[in-house]
Amino acid sequence: MFKIIISVIAKKANKILTYILLIYKIDKKRNRYKMKKTKSISENVLRRLPKYYRILKELEEENIKKISSTAISKMLNFTASQVRQDLSNFGEFGHQGYGYDVIYLKEQINNILGLNRVHNVIVVGGGRIGQALANYKGFKEEGFAVLAVFDIKTDGINVGKGIKVLNMNCIEEFLQNNNVEICVIATQKEVAPTVAQQLKGLGVKSFWNFAPCDLKLGADVAVENINMSESLFMLAYKNKNLN
């Protein structure tokens, strides 16, 4: 079961972290991408944007130069009008009769998501899930640098080269000396809210929470609560209704 859970984490990691950064960055980039000040962007649109980015990366790797909204819609099971409407929230990227330039659109979404620079990440909780996340190579490839793993006990924590393993007593000093934007919470649920509040007070603005509880930290920070049990419950429901 643990191997299945870690596999799910690895496959979904980039998408979820991308969403966290999008929520954190999007308000600062409104004027740059010509969005109307009076127009709000729904969370559903924001969650679809990383899917477009992933598809465009795959198309670029296949040396495909242009693509229509219809083709994108078929790849993602959206409607073509939905694709056009989603992208129009951020600017005018397509041309009638031509479609979208794959590389250009990918670069624009890359900028919107805030993926055009390195983002520093720490992991709090050095158990199996924390170690698996810290060691996931896909983060580095997408520009997310895991700097350190923190726990109250550091013995037995095995992480990759370049990632520090530090006691929680060192976290305040570490945050003062490093520009950390995202904290991954992989602690037990009993301590997760306290730890998150402490880190918020120290200036951390984005949290990716794997503790089995929902963090509620206020509107001034970005939080993505990941409950793996709920995901498995949905998979069990879908499995039950396949026949």
Image (cartoon, grey):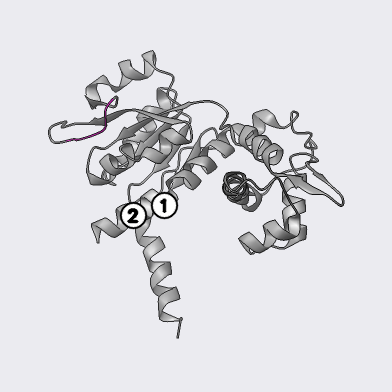
**Residue type, numbered disc 2:** Ser
Above/below status of 57 relative to 197: below
Q: Are marks 1 and 2 in contact (CB under 8 Å)?
A: yes
Instruction: Answer with the quarter of the image where residue 150 lies.
Output: top left
Above/below status of 111 relative to 172: below
Position of 73 with respect to 236 (left or right) is right
**Residue type, numbered disc 1:** Lys
* Residue 92 coordinates in the image, percent (x, y): 81, 41
Q: Where are the magenta residues, as a range?
A: 157-161
Which quadrant of the figure contains the N terminus?
bottom left
* Residue 39 coordinates in the image, percent (x, y): 77, 42
Please state the total of marks drawn on the protein image: 2
Above/below status of 96 relative to 116: below
Crowdedness near tag 2: few (<14), some (14–19) or many (≥20) residues, C-alpha within 10 Å: few
Q: Which residue is mark 1?
A: 11
Q: Which residue is mark 2?
A: 7
* Element at label 1: helix
